[in-house]
Image (cartoon, grey):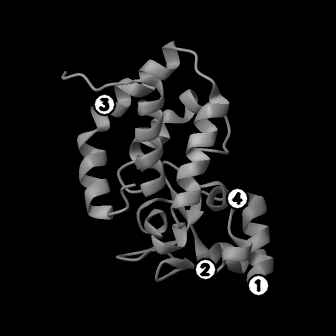
Amino acid sequence: MLTDLVQIQRLGEKKRPENDRFRKHLKTHVYVVRKFKLLAAEVENAIDCKECGNCCRVANTPITPRDSQKLAKFLGMDLDEFRRDYTMQDDEDGVILRREEGKGCVFLEGNLCSVYEGRPVNCELFPHMVKGDGSIPARMWQFIDRATYCPICYNTLEAWKKEVGFWPTAK
């Protein structure tokens, strides 16, 4: 299992076209989704996210109004104060957790989340391979990007390709 973040970034970027072809392949073939979820769960169980934290450094964290309420309560502050101090508006993702230059998520300390018990649902479900809204083929566009920074995504995509006998072709 590959966990080196430099290698994952390099190979994830290199395999973008291949992973996009795999996404299209999944949309035109029928597979047992339960098997994909089992493979993803195996990879998730083999990799400790708390050893990495790269998602918090790289990705935005969209939050819902409910997430804001939960975090404000967890932090012992009122909602307006939480929104002012810990959220920001992003053109693509809407309201997100504030990010700090060179660090990522404002709540990241080392590789750990300082508000882990109160974290947003988006963080609880990340990387959304086992659990998430929509079918796996419909969510594949997210996985292609995440495979450049998340060891779970990278290794799960590789396991899925192996499972279905998908071999890269030169294009």
Res 77 label: 1
Image position of 170 (left or right of 59) = left
Front tag of 3 and 2:
3
Contact flag, marks 1 and 2 (Cβ < 8 Å) = yes
Tell which circle, 4 or 2, labels the residue nearer the N-terminal end: 2
Q: CA distance from mark 3 to mark 2?
A: 41 Å
Comparing 81 with 31, the one in front is 31
Q: Quadrant of residue 167?
A: top left
Residue 80 place in picture, x, y as percent: 73, 75
Three-letter residue code for mark 1: Met
Res 121 label: 4
Residue 93 sits above or below residue 89 on the image: above
Front tag of 4 and 2:
4
Residue that carries the numbered disc 3 in the rendered image = 18
Contact flag, marks 3 and 2 (Cβ < 8 Å) = no
Tell me what residue is drawn at x 71 percent, y 57 percent: 64
Front tag of 3 and 1:
3
Q: Secondary structure at mark 2?
A: helix
Tell which circle, 4 or 1, labels the residue nearer the N-terminal end: 1
How would you rate the neighbour count of disc 1 (Cα within 10 Å): few for under 14, some for 14-19, many for 20 or more?
few
Residue 101 place in picture, x, y as percent: 37, 75
Q: Is residue 128 in sight in this rendering?
A: no
